[in-house]
Amino acid sequence: MNVKSLFWFYFGFVFVGFASSLWSLLTSVLTVMPMPLPYWLLYTPGNIVTAGVVVVALLLVLYAYLGVALVLGKLLRGLVPIIMVIAFTIGITLLLVRQAIPALIILVIAYVMLIGTYIVITSVTTSRTSKALWGVATIILALMPLILIRGGLAVINYIKYMALVEQATAIMASAIEAWRLGTHNP
Amino acid sequence: MEKRLKPIWITPLVIALAVASMVVLVVDGVGASPSLIASIHIGGFGEVDYYASQPMPNVPPGLLVRVYLINGSVIEPVDAFIDVYANAPNGIVHVSMGYSTTLIVPFSNVNWQYVINKWVLLGLLGVSSSEYETSMLIFITYVRGNESWILPLVIPYNVAWAIKNSRYIVVNAFINVNSIKPSEVIPAMPGTTAVNLQLPSNHSDYTTYNCDLSAPKPPPETAFKPEITCLGFNGSLPATWVTLSNGVIQNDEGLQFELNIYFSGTINWDAMAAGYGDIGISYSAPENWILSSPTYTIGSQITQPGSVYWYYENATWAIVNYTVWFVSSSMGTYHLGNATVFEVLYVPPNDHYIGMVLDYGNGSVSLLYYLASKHYLEYPASIVNYAAFVYTGQEYLYQCNGPVTNASTTSGTAYAITLGGVNTAYSLSLAELGTGLGGLALGISSMLITPSTSSSVTSTYIEFFNVKTGTNLYISVIDASKTYGLPTFGFILNATSYYGNPTTYTCKYGKVAQIG
């Protein structure tokens, strides 16, 4: 398959991850400074939710691109990210129309498919380092809900750190893969 | 050789972004993203966020007030006069003030501790301090040219947080100069335009007192001089009521009714400000009652126009008038404006303190009507539903916003109307609203759930018996939470037309049922 077409997926993944983490850091620091700020830079829960929605939307577009690229490259496992994107979209739509129970079921399926997507990415990466990092991110992603169910809200801070590590690992893995795809011709 | 898809600099950029992301994530992680517990919106002009861990550097546990000016699409911090008061069980206490973009008030503030001690002393009788859900009262004054804006905000908090130093309360106040009406800054002498609270002199169910309590430490000297007039009320606080007009007393002799109340869970009392409406929850308490009134018969038990009401005994509530002056040795004295807030300070937490009384013009319900219509708050706009019995050759039952249902009983057909105004207003399903039936002949019932009490059931019913040919009854249902901050509904009965003679009102169903 034409793995090179995945370069833009990895690039987008790094870019979105960087932009969202920088935004959250900047707003929390800038909001305590006595300086004029546009509304979207204010560190308020409403803005954090909006930023989260934008990040999720961008990531879904990226995963859809990944899935389509894999399917076009004759790799049927590309259907996994496509199903995941569809499930997330349906789940979030159901949440918006206040159908909490069906939304929860669909979102659980979507989360399982997200873990599947990580496995797919792990399988198509070309560098060994990147493969290992995606593998670690997959394991953390799969462990987080289990730990949350076992420990309840008492472990929420650990979950936050796990999410941070997972995000860092995935970004690093994407960067290494983008580097490899950008400089080597496999 | 493949065609080059991307510019040469893109790979180093990806690496740079990834490394930068690592740095940012580590900084984020070390700062441990603050844990937001709850977030409340107050109208379009305030937001309160509660954190269990420090949300920003150098902020102690307690209150942080930040003031922003909204001007078009840009929002920016702005200097304003921030004045903070704490609600005590029977009054308000000045806590802190300053002229800045932010004001930090730690729980350790001497005046705040003074108020916390008042709550702790109240709780010595066996109530845990964590059960006191009281509030702070904040006024923010922004002056630009010869115009001023005064924002009143009420910030709920739990007394135990202050004792344990366990919460960070961040208040964002938004002064939208395009949507909030300004006051005019006028030269004046202090005290010359202070509001005089006029009250009816004949009252029996409550006592009035000055509720501006003096704290241990006087506020610092500034050019801004706030003046507080706090009129306290101690006694019966209406929970739900039915008001009968003179026409009903004359026309509907023999008509019987019962007023029922079903409250379960945490009840919130919202503070109301003239010109702003709901400005936050001033007090919350767990309540649990399922009570039916005796059957009242018009003409025998009730012989003159007035109200019958369920009330909370030994509650305290207040009308706070806030006036700000600017005093400068070179420029003279200016009146910047004023704000008036109606808030509940304290309600006993259990069901032993409830009673039912008649009010022929000297009780708490009369006072509420008086204050709402004469002084501070808009009132007829909050009527949420109508229903009527009218004799027009045959007898009909009109209802406005909900379906008419009927049920067979041993004594004939009983009709029940779900007064569905709340259904429309708050998007509740009919299953949630429910229906109550009068056992004998006819029940008009409403099961009304207020929006702010999600974990609670708050409902009031009025049921009618002995409805017969010649009965003329127009029933108006008032959503009192929109006028007084009480989480319930009042009923006004008239004989010839609905309350306030509305020329138009929207009915979702407009159904008419023949009952004669």
Image: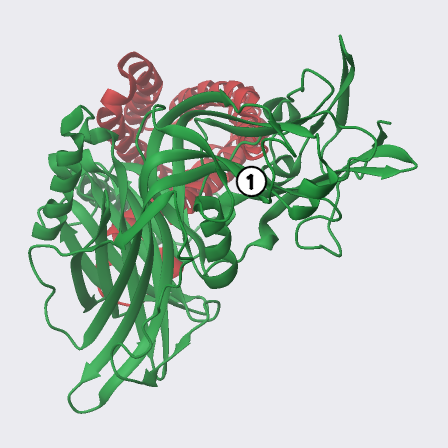
Q: Chain of mark 1?
A: B
Shade representing chain A:
red
> From this viewpoint, which residue is outermost toward the right?
B393
Quarter of the image for residue B132 reads top left
Residue A164, x across and y down, in percent: 26, 33
Tell me if residue B362 can be seen: yes
Would you name the residue on which mark 1 appears?
B490
Quarter of the image for residue A68 reads top right
Residue A102, x across and y down, in percent: 56, 20
Q: Quadrant of the C terminus of chain B?
A: top right
Q: Judge by depth and name the residue closer to the eye, B371 or A157.
A: B371
Shade representing chain B:
green
Q: Is residue B29 left or right of residue B278?
A: left
Q: Label 1's element?
A: strand
Tell me if residue A48 can be seen: no
Instruction: Please name the residue shown 50% across and 49% down the image.
Output: B361
> From this viewpoint, which residue is outermost toward the top?
B410
Quarter of the image for residue A95 reads top right
